[in-house]
Image: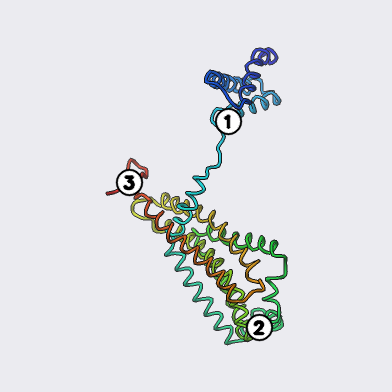
Amino acid sequence: MDLDAYVAEHRGEWRRLEELSGRRRLSAAEVDELVALYQRAATHLSVLRSRAPEPVLVARLSQLVLRARGRITGRPRPSWAAVGRFLLVGFPGAVYRAWPWWCAVATGFSLLSGFLIWYVAGHPDTAAAFIGEEAAAELVRSGFAGYYTEFSAPTFAFHLWTHNAWIAAQCLASGVLVVPVFWLLWQNALNVGVVGGVMVSYGRADVFFGLITPHGLLELTGVFVAAGVGLRTAWAWIAPPPRLSRGQAVAEAGRSAILAALGLVGVFAVSAVLEAFVTPAPVPLAARIAAGAAVWLAFLAYVVVFGRRAAAQVPRWSRRAGRVRADPGP
């Protein structure tokens, strides 16, 4: 194959294709011409790759073909309707459908943390065994309260956001394995129980609950949701519903988990702002707790109202022709 002759023969078509691909507006005739030139250029590219794969020419023609295809098919644009559907249907629906799971997680976590706080507070030697007597005294004097003012608020908020999002991602990703989720929950419950028990044993329960409540309500709820959605995915694998195969059940639960993960990024951003700006704010304790409780209740109301509506819109599924299809039902 004479490469120079081939290029000379088709250079005009390529140049015309490049010109049409770069125009913002095309007439109907120009659109037809663009499609025809794109098809020819794709054929030319295939010939060059198989018979004379000159790297520079192949790369240039590949770029031209991709640009022309993008001009024909159009570039995907962000849709505000899709964002609205995610916020009003996708995320709250995913969280609402998993409510028995994350409510069970929340109950178990709260009972375990409460028991650990009570036990550590009543057995000071236990706290010493966990963190040491000097560390416990330092925690009470300034360590616990100083944690919230050690860094600047924006830096602290970003750190909290990424840290909590990482914990949630671990719960969601490892949910199908079950054990890692319980291990992560145990670690967090142990941390809350030991620190809370030490503070209570030294008579600083007001400081502990006063600092942890404003942001902890929303933050821990986000962790509970992540763990519950992850465990729901595991249960879909362990005991899939009769209407679905095991793979289909896991895929369906996995799609809900992805929606929950995306939404929890925003939830943890809000909780990080609360922890960095509201928790250490020099305002009365009642005002800080009221602010955190208001945001937490607003999130629960959002999930219940929009999630229930979204769950009611989900079609029932039936099997037909070896695949899953939507069945509107009676």
Say which quadrant the N terminus sits in.
top right
On the image, the x and y values in percent for residue 87 come to 50, 53
Q: Give the amino acid type for the residue marked by disc 3 in the picture.
A: Asp
Query: Quick check: marks 2 and 1 in contact, CB under 8 Å?
Result: no
In the rendering, which numbered label is found on residue 252?
none
Q: Can residue 21 be seen in this view?
A: yes
On the image, the x and y values in percent for residue 175 come to 50, 59
Residue behind mark 1? 70
Instruction: Using the rendered view, name the quadrant where residue 96 is placed.
Output: bottom left
Q: Which of marks 2 and 1 is in front?
A: 1
Q: Is residue 187 visible?
A: no
The answer to whether 307 appears left or right of 275 in the picture is left
Instruction: Using the rendered view, name the quadrant where residue 150 is placed.
Output: bottom right
Residue behind mark 2? 128
Mark 2 burial class by Cα count in 10 Å: few <14, some 14-19, many 20+: some
Element on which disc 2 rests: helix
Q: Give the amino acid type for the residue marked by disc 1 in the picture.
A: Gly
In the rendering, which numbered label is found on residue 327?
3
Q: Which of 144 and 291 is in front in this view?
A: 291
**Residue, x 60% and y 21% (percent of image)?**
41
Instruction: Using the rendered view, name the quadrant where residue 220 is placed.
Output: bottom right
Furthest toward the left, the residue is 330
- The Cα–Cα distance between marks 3 and 1, rounded to whole angstroms, is 36 Å
Mark 1 burial class by Cα count in 10 Å: few <14, some 14-19, many 20+: few
Q: Nearer the viewer, residue 171 or 283?
A: 283
On the image, the x and y values in percent for residue 210 come to 60, 77
Q: Give the vertical position of 32 relative to 150 (above or below).
A: above
Q: Give the amino acid type for the residue marked by disc 2 in the picture.
A: Ala
